[in-house]
Image (cartoon, rainbow, N blue to C red):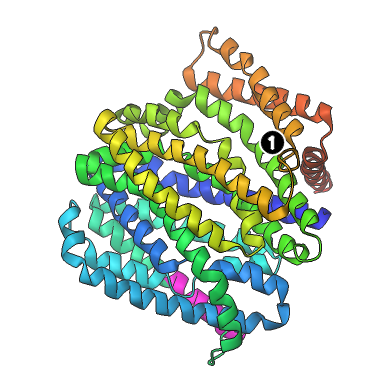
Amino acid sequence: MSSRTNRVTILAISKLLNFAVQFLTPVFLVRIIDRELYGQYKEFFVYASLIGTFIAFSIKYNLLYFISKNPEGTKYYVSNTIYMEFTACLIGIIIIYVFKSNIIGTTSFNFFFLLVAYLIITKNFDFLEAYWLSQKKSAYVFYYSFVYAALRVISVVATAYLTKNVISILYTVVIFEIFRLLFSIVFSIYKKLLVFKVNYEFLKEQLVYIVPLGLAGLLVDFNADVSKIVISTNLGPAALALYAIGSQRVPLISIIQTSIADVIFPDMAEKVKDEPISALTLWKRANVLYLFLLVPLFYLQLYYAETIIKVLFTKDYLGSVSLFQIYLGFFLLQCFEMGIPIRVKNKNGLLLVGHIFYTIVHIGVLYLLYSLIGFLGPAIAFVFMEIIFTFYFGSLILKIYNIKVKELLYWRKIFIIITIGLVCTPVLFAGSLLNLNQVVTAIVFSIIYIILYLIVVSHFHFDETDMFLSKISKKLKLEQRWKRSA
């Protein structure tokens, strides 16, 4: 458990730093280029993300499952993954080329060539992080992702500052991604992970796992991005810029979630065949840890929403505050990643069926609310569907593991943590009574709130929170001793 906690801590810090660095991109760009140009920049990445998800097809994530189960077959699983990524990319590029005129017709400027180049470069040899996680080498992910993110932000911001031209910025992104691709190729060859022969026995096993998971993943990302497509095509890039800023906190949810999930998934895959309830216990404990880390962020973002938008993205983007708060409506709900227990039992077909139904209903609700409410409609539709399907996937877990509702989660711990977060909020209201600078007030009283929250939570001595706080405390003490000795 200690080793697992260390890996979670390293990966969580890695993703937090990675997000912090990437978060600087919009913070700088909104100050360098106008809202129309920033909207065009985001428009490119909305299409790149949506189409890229179809091409990627969640192929690389099979490594977390198969290498954990059969380490001896590592080079064959990796090689097959590389070949599948190439095949999927080729098919995807052919398909989008057929619809070239449709894509160009719905966008505010022509970036088709850059889109194709970006997809080819980023969707091949894209396996390193999944490979390292399957090897339980979270530190490698930390160094790689942080350096990669930092260099990319620097290059993008520098180009924006020098050119004030969205095409030049996108060319810089493409050129930068070429270096990432070359690094992945060299690493594959150096580590002898690339075998120039397809292992068909392993390939069949991988495809059975990947196909339903990939299709479900497509629908998940489609549902996440379709609202942006609706806003972009109906209201233009300026409105998309507001929408993109309003949902900026969404990656923060997945940072903690994926950090823990990527660590526990290989461990669950090892246990689930012989000890399914023990594997489920890992997931339940992870949910408590998600919640413990995200509850204070939820309340702080909800209370200081306007300040966050105004300070980070300027007053020009205050129109996105309501959207920001709507997305916070399912912030805590996303702490419960209901897909992991289903995937680890290789019941990906059930995920696929659920997401097909989700997509059909979501599209209908989205267009209904957009026609009634307008700009905020797609966000409300997305939140509504997330709530409904969290309960739906919970019911699948009950059936798969043959357990009762009371055994699904650690309900008492969850209730106490959420309540503690709420009980501590009067501290934030107290800050508004003082005549201080808005930013200073937010920083000072956020720190006071978090300290109070941690003190109260630690009083209950939950295993998950005590272990995490103990690890952090030990690391801080070691750093202090090192500084003293230096």
Residue 175: image quadrant is bottom left
Residue 304 locus on image (x, y percent): 49, 23
Residue 318 locus on image (x, y percent): 34, 27
- Residue denoted by label 1: 292
Q: Main secondary structure of the magenta part?
A: helix
In magenta stretch: residue 206: no
In the image, taking residue 395 as reference, residue 213 lies left or right, namely: left
Disc 1, SS: helix
Residue 55 locus on image (x, y percent): 39, 68
Query: Can residue 191 be seen in the rendering of this structure?
Result: no
Residue 79 locus on image (x, y percent): 55, 83
* Above-or-below relation of 417 to 430: below
The one nearer the camera, 482 or 76, is 76
In the image, taking residue 159 as reference, residue 399 lies left or right, namely: right
**Residue furthest bottom in the image:** 197
Mark 1: which amino acid?
A: Phe
> Where the N terminus falls, by quadrant?
bottom right
The one nearer the camera, 360 or 382, is 360
Q: How many marks?
A: 1
* Above-or-below relation of 406 to 140: above
- Mark 1 nearby-residue class (10 Å; few <14, some 14–19, many ≥20): many
Residue 242: image quadrant is top left
Residue 320: image quadrant is top left
Query: Can residue 345 be seen in the rendering of this structure?
Result: yes
Start-end of magenta stretch: 179-193
